[in-house]
Amino acid sequence: MNKINALFANNKDRKLLSLYFCAGCPTLEGTGDVIKAMERKGIDMIEVGIPFSDPLADGPVIQSAGTKALKNGMTVKKLFAQLKAIKNEVQLPLVLMGYLNPIMHYGIEKFFQSCVESGVSGTIIPDLPFDDYLKVVKPIADKYDIRVIMMITPETSEERIRFIDEHTDGFIYMVSSASITGAQSSFGDAKLAYFNHINAMNLRNPRMIGFGISNKQTLTSAQDNAAGAIIGSKFVTLLNEVGCPDQALDLLFEALKK
């Protein structure tokens, strides 16, 4: 079974925590150390960002991390080599999050084949048109048993959400707001109403809520309304500040209690 599917199947009564970081930031060779630190600290799933020069959905923190990673020399090829080097040391699901341009440049089939070879279980491609996913990407991803995770936002129609739910597997990435990434102090009534609306749809796929989670209030709101939460900007900020992934994780856990 794909590791993403196994994670949700085996943890139906426990709220999950997934973290994002950008490969190649703060250091080019630190990807493996960050992943292994996350696994030691009990993170359930990891999103590894592929840096790109023209991101669409990323806020200032992750944009800056991507710029630094590119300056450090991170490439898709180098990232796969780093992941392959630690494949036998990592048990939890890895999800690559990146934009379509670098993946097409690398080669779509080659990309999914490399995912298998390096222990990656899924991908998130925010700018992948759904029609292209169905016609081009999904058949290749299915061939290699890699999950392609789709995002929904408060602006996504119910019809579209049900279509995504029908044609994807693994989980649905539920974006907390129709804006870019970045830490927030709280989720207001409109976002909670959105969460409740999606809950009432009784979707087939489990959901993870991301964007804006940085403290106890936002974490609790996300975990109360989905299978778990995804944290990106807050962890990326801490990792850049202290450099050491173990220390950054400890600081994150402290922040999530406040």
Image (spheres, rainbow, N blue to C red):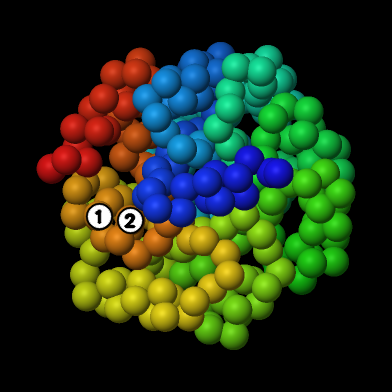
Query: Which of 208/202 is in front?
Result: 202
Left or right of 156, for residue 237: left
Q: What is the C-alpha distance between the residues marked 1 and 2?
A: 5 Å
Residue extending furthest left? Answer: 258
Q: Is 173 rendered above or below residue 98?
A: below
Residue type at tag 2: Gln
Residue 52 visible in the displayed image: no
Of the 4 image quadrants, the one containing the N terminus is top right
Query: Which of 252/220 is in front?
Result: 220
Left or right of 164, for residue 212: left
Q: Which residue is at a point 69% across and 44% down the rendered structure image?
A: 2
Of the 4 image quadrants, the one containing the C terminus is top left
Query: Residue 188 placed where, x, y %?
Result: 21, 70
Residue type at tag 1: Thr
Q: Residues within 10 Å of mark 1 (few under 14, many from 20)?
A: some
Query: Residue 206 placed where, x, y %?
Result: 52, 61
Q: Which residue in the protein does label 2 denote? A: 223
| Residue 60 quadrant | top left
Q: Which residue is at a point 16% across and 40% down the rendered structure image?
A: 257
Q: Which mark is residue 192?
A: none
Q: Which residue is at a point 22% across and 41% down the rendered structure image?
A: 256
Query: Residue 169 placed where, x, y %?
Result: 66, 59
Residue 92 visible in the displayed image: yes
Query: Residue 192 placed where, x, y %?
Result: 28, 72
| Element assignment for label 1 | helix
Left or right of 185, for residue 96: right
Q: Is 249 rendered above or below residue 62?
A: above
Label pair 1/2, CB-CB below 8 angstroms: yes
Q: Which residue is at a point 54% across and 73% down the rendered structure image?
A: 203
Left or right of 165, for residue 59: left
| Element assignment for label 2 | helix
Q: Which residue in the protein does label 1 denote? A: 220
